[in-house]
Image (cartoon, helix red, strand yellow):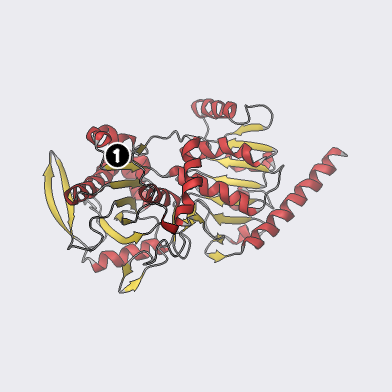
Amino acid sequence: MPSLRTEKRGIMRIERPIRPNWPERKWPRVAFIAHALLDGYRSTDLISRRLDELGQKWPQDGEDPGFINWFSFPVTPVDGQGQSVWVDFYIIPVLAGQFLAACKSGQAYDWAEAVALAAIAEAKADGVHITVGWGALTKVATTHGARFLERNAWVKSDDMVSTTHGDAGTAALVLETIRRAGFKRGFRVAVIGANGAIGDAISRLLPSLSPESILLVGKGGEVNASRLNELRARVFGGGDRVAIHQDKSSACHDHRSDLVIIATTGMDIAPSEIPLGALVLDMTTPSACHANSEWQNNRLVLASGCGRFADRAVKESFGQFGGELLADVGAGGHHVLWGCAGETITRAVAEWHGHVAGTNIPLGDIQWCDSHFPELGFAPQLPVSFGRSLDWSDVHAFVERSQKRISVQASQHLHQ
């Protein structure tokens, strides 16, 4: 792993990695930037191990956390579609709660910007194109990359630098997961966090899956209600097939949802807030749903929004870690990474140049992911529920039972 050299760029301190030559130095590069999640997560344990390898410790309160190159690996397109790229996954060693607090103070932006500028400086010194991706709460810190481009306007005109927040990739994986789960025409779906970037995009695409009803759930207050109503007008053209709700504790029960998509950040969802028989797709990082025996009472929670690379696309897995190949980084299993990371890598492989920034996700970006993910064999992760691996057949059976129950209840309601 690289050591660091400190430079000055205006008032911003740049810590540029120094590493010896490696065969892929002249490959196009990806710098994906994130932070640690929660204690007890496999990813957090691996970050601790990397810090130990580098002779570093978790920062104390008030210390500049800096960043580390968590792992690096080459990616090769499947069947020669695109170009090979070198991926560096950078971590700001700060847990999610502290990072979110730092977003409010503005510190988190400085931390994230420092990583991006360092990675860009190294790529420019090597004369290679770089695609920067924003992960987890670095999206909040950088306003989904928009603030970074505003503060560094030169990046937008530099044809050797591209950036993306990757949320279209996450949305694309969630929608494909719904298809694979076996939902048939007429299901009832709720989107918790519909006012967020991903929730908004998914809500607009749900009509293509032929649900009977869509519930848009957001936080309380008049401003949020206005935003929900504006979104409602863009989904199914409004009408009685789309409803809004501002109390997550009762929303899914009132709606009788049999699919619940959680697309919000910094919120916990309790089993009591979800109807019996519902499938929950939790795409949040860190997860909104936590292990609890009550979930086993005829509810199924799946981690969602992550994808698995075909083995031939990541022939060296995610690189060397502790003298062994790293295949599981805690995103959901073998060769699984978060959807936003997958999109960033895919854009680099596809030789895409440009910038995807801001919280408004054009539906065309999601469709772009649908058409280009096959270049890496990048598809939704296999079903995982609180660390327990399932088969798609298990999910299909659960959904079939749920939809039969909904059908019976609807029939009984008509005859009352």
| Residue 40 visible in rendering | no
Disc 1 residue crowd, few under 14, some 14–19, many 20+, Cα 10 Å: few
Residue depicted at x 34% and y 73%:
324
Residue 60's x, y, as percent?
Answer: 24, 56
User: Of all residues shown, which one is farthest toward the right?
Assistant: 415
Residue 236's x, y, as percent?
Answer: 63, 30
Residue depicted at x 59% and y 35%:
216
The residue nearer to you, when weighing 249 against 263, is 263
The three-letter amino acid code for the residue at tag 1 is Ser
| Residue 211 visible in rendering | yes
Residue 66's x, y, as percent?
Answer: 23, 52
The residue nearer to you, when weighing 392 against 330, is 392
66 vs 260, left or right, is: left
The residue nearer to you, when weighing 318 against 269, is 318
Quadrant of residue 316 in the image?
bottom left
Q: Quadrant of the C terminus?
A: top right
Residue 381's x, y, as percent?
Answer: 52, 58
The residue nearer to you, when weighing 128 against 5, is 128
Label 1, on which residue? Answer: 105
Relative vertical location of residue 230 with respect to residue 109 in this rendering, above or below:
above
Number of numbered labels in the structure image: 1
Q: Quadrant of the N terminus?
A: bottom left
Residue depicted at x 69% and y 29%:
240
Relative vertical location of residue 401 with respect to residue 9 in this rendering, above or below:
below
Residue depicted at x 29% and y 39%:
105
Q: What secondary structure is found at the residue carrying circle 1?
A: helix
Quadrant of residue 245 in the image?
top right
